[in-house]
Structure formats: C-alpha cells, structure tokens
Image (cartoon, rainbow, N blue to C red):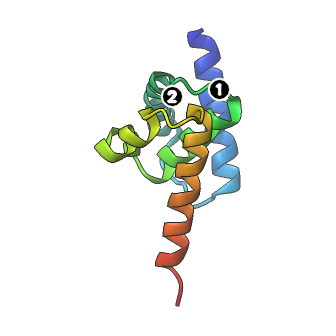
Amino acid sequence: MTQFLDSFVRDTVRKLKQQFPAITEPDEHLNARMKIALEYANVFSLKEKNAKHNFLMLEAFYPGFYLKAEVKKWLKTPNGYSADQRLEDFKHVIINRESRRFEW
C-alpha cells in the first residue's frame, strides 16, 4: 500500500507541476507534504482517484487547508452526499472565491 501511495503522490506532483508551472516547491518537499495530505484524505473516506487528486491539488495551493476546523466540518458532515462530492463542492467554492478575488 505504501508503494501505491508513493507512486500516486509522485505521479500527481509531476502532473500538477506540468499543469501549474507556478508550483516551484522542490519535489522532495512537495512529495512529503502531499503524502501526509493523502494519508489525511483517507480520514475523510475519499474513494475516487479523481477526488484524491483534487485533494492534493488543493493542498498544493493551500498547504494544510484540511486542518482548518471549517474545512474538516464541511468534509466530515454527512449531508446526503459522499465525501467525494463534498470535496468537489468545496473545490468549486474555493475556485469561485479565488476568481472573485482577482476580478477587476
């Protein structure tokens, strides 16, 4: 299982750095941080590979986002939707908030 996690993290970091060249954190630091985040993502019972990828993408831009009380509450509160869907909703909220922040 550890080998799978390491491989998933390395692959995700590589893809994120290709997609977002602004991510300049050295691989060894980013990989370590992402592995911790992925282990924490399992606490939220994320099932889909894409949801785990999104979790790591959020971690790349907002280090430790999942440690904030309001985020934990959002992701852990059962509201009829899966943890994967709650994370997707959270991602859209963050993206919308960020895009409004940069509007002229």
Assess disc 2: are there few (<14), some (14-19) or many (≥20) residues with their C-alpha within 10 Å of its C-alpha.
many
Residues at marks 2 and 1 touching, judged by CB atoms closer than 8 Å: yes
Q: Which of marks 2 and 1 is in front?
A: 2
Residue that mark 1 sits on: 8
Q: What element carries label 1?
A: helix
Question: Could you tell me the amino acid type at mark 1?
Answer: Phe
Q: Residue 39 carries which label?
A: none
Quarter containing the N terminus = top right
Looking at the rendering, which quadrant does residue 85 occupy?
A: top right
Q: Residue lying farthest front?
A: 80
Task: Please provide percent x and percent y for residue 43.
Answer: 45, 22
- At x 66%, y 41%, the residue is 14
**N-term mark: 2 or 1:** 1
Q: Which mark is residue 38?
A: 2
- At x 36%, y 39%, the residue is 73
Question: Could you tell me the amino acid type at mark 2?
Answer: Leu
| Residue placed most toward the observer, 77 or 59 | 77
Q: Residue lying farthest bottom?
A: 104
| Residue placed most toward the observer, 27 or 41 | 41
Assess disc 1: are there few (<14), some (14-19) or many (≥20) residues with their C-alpha within 10 Å of its C-alpha.
some
